[in-house]
Image (cartoon, grey):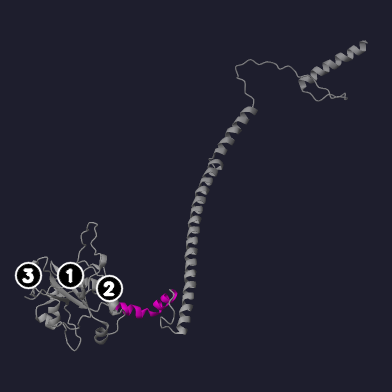
Amino acid sequence: MEPPTSSKLNSRKRRKDGSGPNGATELDGIPPKMSRRSLGLREPAPFSDEVEIDYSKPYIRVTYEEAMRGTPWDRPVRVYADGIFDLFHSGHARALMQAKNLFPNTYLIVGVCSDELTHNFKGFTVMNENERYDAVQHCRYVDEVVRNAPWTLTPEFLAEHRIDFVAHDDIPYSSAGSDDVYKHIKEAGMFAPTQRTEGISTSDIITRIVRDYDVYARRNLQRGYTAKELNVSFINEKKYHLQERVDKVKKRVKDVEEKSKEFVQKVEEKSIDLIQKWEEKSREFIGNFLEMFGPEGALKHMLKEGKGRMLQAISPKQSPSSSPTHDRSPSPSFRWPFSTKTPPSSPANRSRNESAVTYDISEDEED
């Protein structure tokens, strides 16, 4: 029976926008939290030539139904996945995770092609074969690594490693003069499709580096690599150093601008606070001034009150009309010193003075 198509697989497909934790999409859902415990392995996966296989037991492939139902613990479903795995990234890890979770009891064997095969059929790699072997060995989903894996799977290779199913994405892989190198595996019912992780691949990573070549060249020059190691010409080396100095100056200018903006903002805030306080104090001062010196201010009332008291103190009190009148005693006459003339007097006093004068004269005459 044919295995299910890729649409039926419970895969975690990451889109280019990469929303969600660890690249999970809305369709994946948020996985439940797990208790804190160690799930990792302590040692890397062994190579196939280091694993002993009991060839005394006959090699009988399990069917897809048997694999889905679950096999005994000592007879896991042996799934094979191959690739170049250059610049090992999360897309590779996700593909191997899907292959590991195809069946309840899965033993995952991963084949890594050598440099010679890869350079002949696909192109030059960034990492050499030993680096790529080591990267796959340390993936947590891998149980065994096959070095120098074949480009096209043969029945002899499948029987030697006792492979039950081959996992790969179901896009036809045209190479080595074939429209699809997995065509015979699909026809034999041994193909288990997986999903590619969109948005990341080895070619995408190399494209980023090539596109921003100057940035990464300058970065490595700063880290101590020589122009010869980076295959950079003398002129480009000087250009990169000059660009680095210009960038430093730009960064300093930007920092100064940001600091000046912060300073201006603080000054504006303080000036606004001072203006607000000044307005409050001025309003308070004007209110107090008007309260004291305004048309109806306290000073006007004080002046009115003081004026009334002064008038009351200066003006004599009028005697009541019913009280009896008393003759005032005449004030004594005042004579100016060294003068025989007397000051002018009132008519009443004048008559009295005349009588006094006549009296005085009569006395002189008698003398």
Instruction: Compare marks 1 and 2 and give the one earlier in the sequence.
Output: 1
Which residue is tagged 3? 66
Question: Residue 198's quadrant in the figure?
Answer: bottom left
Question: How busy is the neighbourhood of tag 1: few (under 14 within 10 Å), some, or many (20 plus)?
Answer: many
Name the residue at 50% across, 58% down. Answer: 267
Name the residue at 47% across, 61% down. Answer: 262
Answer whether residue 154 is visible to the viewer in this image.
Answer: yes
Name the residue at 50% across, 61% down. Answer: 263
Asked whether residue 46 is drawn in magenta, I would say: no
For this orientation, the residue located farthest to the right is 367
77 to the left or right of 275: left
Disc sitting over residue 100 in the figure: 1
For this orientation, the residue located farthest to the front is 56
Q: Position of residue 30 (x, y in %)?
A: 21, 62
Report the quarter where the N terminus lies.
bottom left
The magenta segment: 204-222
For this orientation, the residue located farthest to the bottom is 177
The amino acid type, in three-letter code, at marker 2 is Ala
Q: Position of residue 217 (x, y in %)?
A: 41, 78
The amino acid type, in three-letter code, at marker 1 is Lys
Disc sitting over residue 135 in the figure: 2
Q: Position of residue 309 (x, y in %)?
A: 60, 30
Question: Residue 304's quadrant in the figure?
Answer: top right
